[in-house]
Image (cartoon, helix red, strand yellow):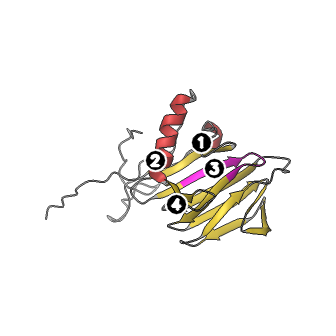
Amino acid sequence: MTLTAAPKPATTSTGTPLPLVALPQGELLTVNSNDIPLIRDALGPGVHFKPLRLDLETGQWVVLAIFEPGAAVPLHYHTGIAQGYTLAGRWHYLEYPDQMQTAGSYLYEPAGSVHTFVSPADNTEDTVLLAFVEGGNVNFTEDGHFHSILDGVTIRHLTDALSQAQGLNGVQYIGGGAAGVVSVDA
């Protein structure tokens, strides 16, 4: 992803200069999920997503995830916090079957949480979840062996590789900063 717009001078709506500590933002950093094509079966059969923000430097990633009825995400350990807001459908963690998450549910997971995501097979609609994740998910097989890591870098790779393989155009998301050496002269 290449940013081409140069930042505009930092001023208020009346043209008054902002304090020097203000971020010189020339445009809103915004995307519309309706304009982002769905990357299908990206995280397993029936598990699709739309990337919204992938910040490789901070390890933060935000996706709109869609789970078909019966889809699951394997047992995983969160290295950072995760937050989820259910927009449609229902789901639960295999380890907490009595705590069904439904449309309107907000879930906070502290770092170190371990669980298995399940979208019940008897769902009558897809489950749609807005997920905010810091760090990665360390994924395990059913018998408890290491399988893979899912983090912002992996999501970026999947976005690039699968959008090309699936012939998707216009996959846009908000990226992170640009790491580099900053030299401040006195």
Viewer-side residue, 144 vs 41 = 144
- How far, Cα to Cα, is label 3 from label 1? 12 Å
Q: Helix, strand or loop at disc 1?
A: loop
Answer left or right for 107 relative to 77: right
Left/right placement of residue 63 relative to residue 122 reads left
Residue named by callout 3: 64
Tell me the distance, in whole angstroms, between the alpha carbons under discs 4 and 1: 16 Å
- Report if residue 169 is visible in the image: no
Query: Tag 3's secondary structure?
Result: strand
Residue drawn at x 37%, y 38% as measured from the top left: 4
Judged from the image, the secondary structure of the residue bearing numbered disc 2 is: loop
| Three-letter amino acid code at the position of disc 4 | Val
Instruction: Please give the label number shown on residue 27.
Output: 2
- Which percent across, then down, holds residue 108? 63, 70
Give the residue pinned by disc 4: 138
Binning the other alpha carbons within 10 Å of mark 1 as few (below 14), some (14 to 19) or many (20 upward) gives some
Span of residues in magenta: 62-72
Label 1 sits on what residue type?
Ala
**Badge number at residue 42:** 1
Label 4 to label 3, Cα distance in Å? Answer: 20 Å
Quick check: 80 left or right of 45? left
How far across and how far down the image is residue 3, in percent?
39, 41
| Res 119 → quadrant | bottom right
Inspect the magenta stretch and tell me whether residue 69 lies in it.
Answer: yes
Considering only order in the chain, which callout, 1 or 2, is on the residue closer to the N terminus?
2
Residue 86 x/y as whole percent? 72, 58
Q: CA distance from mark 2 to mark 1?
A: 31 Å
Q: In terms of sequence position, does the residue under pointer 4 or pointer 1 come before the other?
A: 1
Question: Which quadrant would the C terminus be assigned to in this image?
Answer: bottom left
